[in-house]
């Protein structure tokens, strides 16, 4: 059924002989992304879709580098530079305001299929949880090094110091602007497998690195605006991390904002060391309120 709809759409938009218009390229790209290169090859022959090489020439696809262990600044910076460039994400334009509007940094867990993959770019194993992957050498050096990882995965004693496990969830950190009506999509900058044994304090430690990477990278805050808040659902680990980071300094009582806040009884006046505040996913707040 999907193929039938696809075929009709393709026939409808195929107009240019010897070239491809943007819609045809987009459909060819979707066929490759959803059905894989073999389906694209079949449809290229039968319906004259664009080939893989043509798609690659016309589409610059940013790549998210998943973290092998605990996310580090190099991986985060690489992802920021891959997604946050005017070619991929148009710059915010606010002609009446000299200051760029802020962003929300949000995070949540996404369920993972528990198996390992090979990362050709780094010649390393992907898919081990960040809590335990440091116990083995994740670089693929030889068959023996892979055998060590296999044995560590097969270890049944949960207290063993050599045991490693698959990541059951990927913690995804994404950034979305507060005031951009056209390009408001959340863009991921971290994907890191976890077995969910990490504490809130450990999570806060690497989340600080993500905030720092955004603040200091030329493709981050300088081009797309600062992070104003970090937000998540009500997960205990996420909440502890948010409040660990965002309960560091009080808004100056003598500043214009401080003077306003002083009149608001019961309001939390604490922020992170760079003024970031914690927030909650609105739908979870609504759930508590109405159900
Ligand atoms: Zn683990």
Image (cartoon, helix red, strand yellow):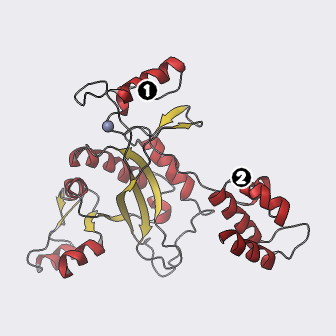
In the rendering, at what x and y percent does residue 173 appear? 40, 56
Seen in the image, is 253 located left or right of residue 278? left
Please tell me which residue is depicted at 18% across the width and 79% down the height of the picture: 289
Q: Cβ(mark 1) to ligand 1 < 8 Å?
A: no
Using the image, tell me which numbered label, if any, was put on residue 37. Answer: 2
Judging by the rendered image, the residue that carries numbered circle 1 is: 150
Mark 2, residues whose alpha carbon is within 10 Å: few (<14), some, or many (≥20)? Answer: some
Q: Is residue 38 above or below residue 75?
A: below
The quarter of the picture where the C terminus appears is bottom left
Q: CA distance from mark 2 to mark 1?
A: 31 Å
- The answer to which image quadrant residue 10 occupies is bottom right
The quarter of the picture where the N terminus appears is bottom right
Q: Where in the image, quadrant-wise, is ligand 1 located?
A: top left
Q: Is residue 31 above or below residue 198?
A: below
Please tell me which residue is depicted at 75% across the width and 72% down the height of the picture: 7
Seen in the image, is 101 located left or right of residue 78? left
Which one is earlier in the sequence, the residue at label 2 or at label 1? 2
Q: Is residue 18 above or below residue 77?
A: below
As helix, strand or loop, the secondary structure at mark 2 comes to helix
Mark 1, residues whose alpha carbon is within 10 Å: few (<14), some, or many (≥20)? Answer: some
The residue lying toward the viewer, choosing from 262 and 107, is 107
């Amino acid at each position: 059924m999907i193929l039938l709809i696809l075929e009709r759409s393709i026939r409808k938009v195929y107009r240019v002989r010897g070239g491809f218009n943007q819609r045809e390229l987009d459909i060819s790209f979707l066929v490759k992304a959803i059905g894989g290169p073999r389906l694209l090859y079949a449809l290229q022959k039968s319906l004259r879709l664009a080939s893989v090489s043509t798609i690659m020439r016309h589409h610059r696809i940013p790549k998210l580098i998943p973290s092998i262990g605990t996310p580090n600044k190099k991986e985060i910076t690489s992802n920021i530079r891959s997604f946050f460039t005017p070619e991929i994400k148009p710059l915010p334009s606010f002609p009446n305001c000299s200051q760029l509007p802020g962003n929300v940094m949000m995070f949540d867990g996404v369920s993972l299929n528990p198996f390992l993959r090979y990362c050709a770019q780094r010649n390393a194993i992907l898919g081990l949880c960040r809590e335990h992957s440091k116990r083995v050498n994740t670089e693929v050096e030889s068959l023996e090094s892979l055998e060590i990882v296999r044995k560590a995965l097969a270890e049944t004693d949960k207290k063993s110091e050599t045991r490693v496990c698959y990541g059951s969830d990927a913690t995804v950190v994404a950034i979305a602007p507060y005031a951009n009506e056209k390009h408001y999509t959340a863009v991921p900058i971290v994907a890191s497998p976890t077995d969910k044994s990490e504490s809130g304090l450990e999570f806060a430690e690497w989340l600080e690195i993500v905030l720092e990477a955004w603040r200091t990278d030329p493709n981050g805050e300088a081009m797309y605006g600062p992070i104003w808040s970090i937000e998540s659902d009500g997960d205990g680990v996420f909440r502890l991390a948010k409040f660990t980071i965002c309960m560091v300094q009080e808004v100056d009582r003598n500043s214009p904002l401080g003077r306003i806040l002083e009149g608001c009884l019961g309001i939390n006046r604490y922020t992170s060391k760079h003024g970031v505040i914690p927030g909650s996913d609105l739908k979870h707040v609504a759930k508590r309120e109405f159900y």
